[in-house]
Image (cartoon, coloured by chain):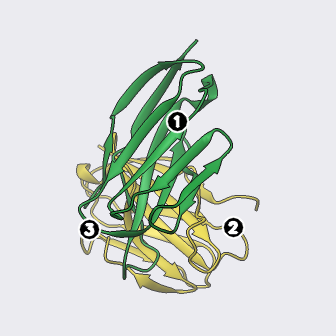
Amino acid sequence: GAGVSQTPSNKVTEKGKYVELRCDPISGHTALYWYRQSLGQGPEFLIYFQGTGAADDSGLPNDRFFAVRPEGSVSTLKIQRTERGDSAVYLCASSLWGNYGYTFGSGTRLTVV
Amino acid sequence: GQQLNQSPQSMFIQEGEDVSMNCTSSSIFNTWLWYKQDPGEGPVLLIALYKAGELTSNGRLTAQFGITRKDSFLNISASIPSDVGIYFCAGRVYGTASKLTFGTGTRLQVTL
């Protein structure tokens, strides 16, 4: 597609449940990033993929968070045993070869109740 | 996680006025970027700076990479209503691949 697509746009889940957030990057972009944006804050880095592999996952807050990109295109961010503190907008971005001209998606707003 | 300090936090200005905002870091950056975010959307890149002292323009926007490598400035001239939004600085620290550290944001509101 023309831009980075994220689904769903909104997700409400109960505390303790498992959620998956999907990101479709721009076709041909090898680099993919996940960021998390809490209310009133700037985006915070979670993980960076170059192709299929996670080149840097230092931003994942704990082992409840995991992300995959099995074919080097679509990526899924998985959160287990969700907590209220996980509520935020999860942003995905992609770029060519890891340059800084990221294109961000519109994000998935996750609310844990 | 670390966030860069941006100031001011928010500003109300009149259409036609010039706007200045800045961003500071405790770390040395080798790349500074400025983004704008509209409600319900992801950030959009406005300007990228790659060298200390660099001054770059994009239309009515001008940004500078500070000489100390620890700060950056964004100026918007002759503001218009569509400049409303949240402006974020972002930087890359040496040796951290493509990971960006974002600022806390400056919310700009333009009145007619």
Looking at the rendered image, the quarter that the C terminus of chain B falls into is top right
Residue located 49% across and 58% down the image: B33
Q: Colour of chain B?
A: green
Q: Position of residue A89 (x, y in %)?
A: 42, 49
Point 26% across, 58% down: residue: A16
Separation of residues labelled 2 and 3 (CA atoms): 26 Å
Residue B90 in the image: x percent, y percent?
42, 58
Query: Mark 1 — on which chain does it sit?
Result: B
The residue beneath circle 2 is A26
Q: Which residue is mark 3?
A: A61
Residue B42 visible, this orientation: no
Q: CA distance from mark 1 to mark 3?
A: 26 Å
Image-quadrant location for residue A86: bottom left
Name the spot of residue B104 as percent of width and height, x first: 33, 46
Local crowd size for mark 1, using a 10 Å CA cut-off: few (<14), some (14–19), many (≥20): few
- B51 relative to A97, above or below: above
As rendered, which of A63 and B4 lies closer to the eye? B4
- Distance from Cα at disc 2 to Cα at disc 1: 22 Å
Camera-near label (1 vs 3) is 1
Of marks 2 and 3, which one's residue comes earlier in the chain? 2
Q: Looking at this view, name the residue that lies furthest to the top.
A: B112
Type of amino acid at the residue the image marks with label 1: Pro
* Left or right position of B73 against A69: left
